[in-house]
Amino acid sequence: MGIVKIIIIALLVWLGFSMLKKLRRPSSQSSQSSQKPSTNKILSCSVCATHIPENEAIIQNGKIYCSKGCL
Ligand SMILES: [Zn+2]
């Protein structure tokens, strides 16, 4: 009977830890995903006013260009 009790307690402890891991992981993922939109800003071209993401924009002399054509 003693071994059965130990197994049940071990299972409960393991379940508790797995529940804590599940609860912690989504919070860390949501904080990472909330940081992503701030890094990928939407800028508007100073020539044709086209809205483009910051990583695709060409920035020269403090002005924003959507493509080499506008540059
Ligand atoms: Zn443009």
Image: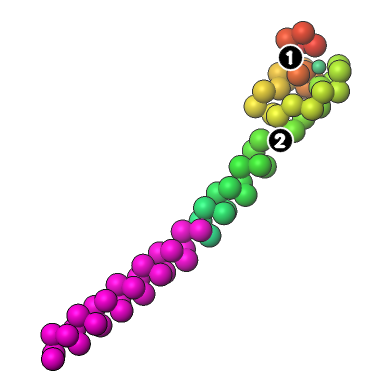
Disc 2 is placed on an element classified as: loop
Mark 2 residue crowding within 10 angstroms, few (<14) / some (14–19) / many (20+): few
Tell me if the residue at label 1 has its CB under 8 Å from ligand 1.
yes
- Looking at the image, tell me whether mark 2 or mark 1 is earlier in sequence order: 2
What's the CA distance linking mark 2 and mark 1?
Answer: 16 Å
Q: Nearer the viewer, residue 6 or 62?
A: 6
Mark 1 residue crowding within 10 angstroms, few (<14) / some (14–19) / many (20+): some
Q: Quadrant of ligand 1?
A: top right
Q: Which residues are magenta?
A: 1-26
Q: 52 left or right of 2?
A: right
Q: Nearer the viewer, residue 60 or 26?
A: 26
- Relative vertical location of residue 30 with respect to residue 21 in this rendering, above or below: above
- Relative vertical location of residue 42 with respect to residue 34 in this rendering, above or below: above
Q: Amino acid at mark 1?
A: Ser
Query: Which residue corresponds to mark 1?
Result: 67
Residue 52 at least partly seen: yes
* Image coordinates for residue 12, horizontal then vertical, percent: 31, 79
Q: Let me know if residue 51 is in the magenta part.
A: no
* Image coordinates for residue 35, horizontal then vertical, percent: 61, 46
| Quarter residue 66 falls in | top right
Q: Amino acid at mark 2?
A: Lys
Can you say which quadrant of the picture contains the N terminus? bottom left
Q: From the image, give the main secondary structure of the stretch colored magenta.
A: helix
Query: Which residue corresponds to mark 2?
Result: 41
Seen at 67% across and 23% down, the residue is 56
Seen at 24% across and 78% down, the residue is 10
| Quarter residue 39 falls in | top right
Residue 60 at least partly seen: no
